Amino acid sequence: MAQRPMPEPEGPLTVSQLAAKIAGVIATGFKAKVRLVGEVSGFRERTHWYFDLKDTEAVVNCVMFAGAARKSRHTPANGAQVLVSGRVEYYEKLGRVTLIVEHIEPVGAGAIDQALRALIEEARRLGWLDESRKRTLPPFPRRIAVVTSRTGAALQDVIDTMRRRCPAVGVVLVDARVQGEGAAAEVAAAIRWLGRASDRLDVDAILVTRGGGSKEDLWAFNERIVAEAIVNSPIPVVAAIGHETDTTLAELVADLRCATPTQAAMRLTPDRAALAEQLDAMSSRLRNALIRDTREQRRRIETVTRMLRQSALGCTGRVAHTLERLARRLESHRPAAAQARRQASLATARARLESAMRARVYAWDVEPVAARLARSVESLREGASLRLGSLERQLSAIGPASVLKRGFSYTMREDGTIVRSTKDARPGDRLRTTVADGVVQSIVEGGSEPAASRSPDSPTAAAPRKRRPSSNRPGADHDAPGDDQMDLFKGGR
């Protein structure tokens, strides 16, 4: 039934009459619910929600009663654009028109999500989301650079966590706005600067973080400029933006995404208690490995020593055999010069043997074995030297010089041949007779009868006519007997 219009009163209206007319007009003009878009201002939560909706030219007072507020999935924030629906009422006692809000939702939420999906798809096409591109975090960083607002609570959470876990890791703060106009440019510039100065600052990783907020508040971390700076950073970047349910492009392209700033600090900083346990375990493993290696090396040294001992005994046996063979040869070849040459050869062989054995022993680092081997070789050498001296004395006893001292002599012709028979001396031959203390020279006398036809008993047969004692000079006369003495032994060779 249509409401009957009130009759116009005669004369001036009272306040109550005007208020009633306004209420009637509003009730008549806004029979259905209205939907309104505006910016939230002056939000107050006092059991009910009180706030204003405004645009550039007007303001509307709003209230959302507790029952409707509890059912709402969105809590308005000052400055946010919202879409509300409700009914318009006029409160006559206060003279105020109020919008009774029954439902509220953010304006542009769908547009924000759509824009974010487009940015994520572009990053995927560029390969920024590939796991193969992402870098490994340093296990023991020297310093961590934190890009955030110095006034935010996230910074204090990061510092407290890092100090508790490992105070040795340093913190470098780069202050930057984390929301609002220009925030994305500041964050991107901070990441690029840290990448260039990482070597000079000893920074091994970057943490980009901030606390929670609305999608609009976090939008700076969805900007392409921030994502590109993270991808191009020469050192790993960890991102912890907002709450665990929030998702930003910066977190998706970072080398590691963490739910909270505290979790990011824990992932970047080693735990000193865990490090101490790892150090103890590594020390135990190293100690056991050293014990095993020492035992193995000792076993190898014992094996090498045993092999060297056997080799040394074999070498000693061969040396002794060689010395015996040389001693037998020396029995039949005893001239002083030959003896000297053989002694020199033996000394050279002994020196080479000692050098070779010493080099071999040094190569295996068995100095005690080398010392015992050297003493054994020296003992063998001294024994061989004693045997050689004994052989030399025996040879000297039966040598030509000893025979001459016993009254014997030998005679040679000028050509150096020995006179063994009267047939070997002809008249006129010059002879040299060697006795113990010198040489007697003579000339053979005789007639025309050949020396070979004369009787050996003939006084002129090969008898020297004249003997001239040698002057015993140290010249050629003394050298000749030495040469003849060596010729006496040629037949025995």
Image (cartoon, rainbow, N blue to C red):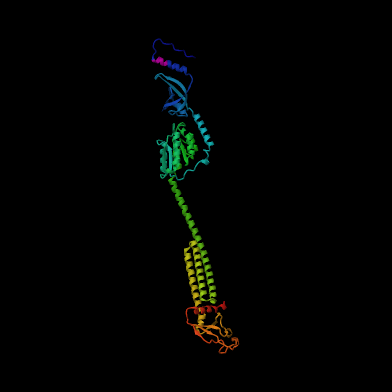
Residue 368 seen: yes
The image position of residue 106, as x and y in percent, is 47, 28
The image position of residue 235, as x and y in percent, is 47, 42
Residue 247 seen: no
The image position of residue 460, as x and y in percent, is 56, 88
Residue placed at 48% from the left, 58% from the top? 294
| Residue furthest top as drawn | 10
| Residue furthest right as drawn | 453
Asked if 463 appears above or below 288 in the picture, the reply is below
Give the residues drawn in magenta, as a range.
15-20
The image position of residue 395, as x and y in percent, is 51, 78
Check if residue 140 falls in the magenta segment: no
Asked if 449 appears above or below 484 in the picture, the reply is below
Q: Main secondary structure of the magenta part?
A: helix
- Between residue 130 and residue 448, name the one nearer to us: 448
Check if residue 17 falls in the magenta segment: yes
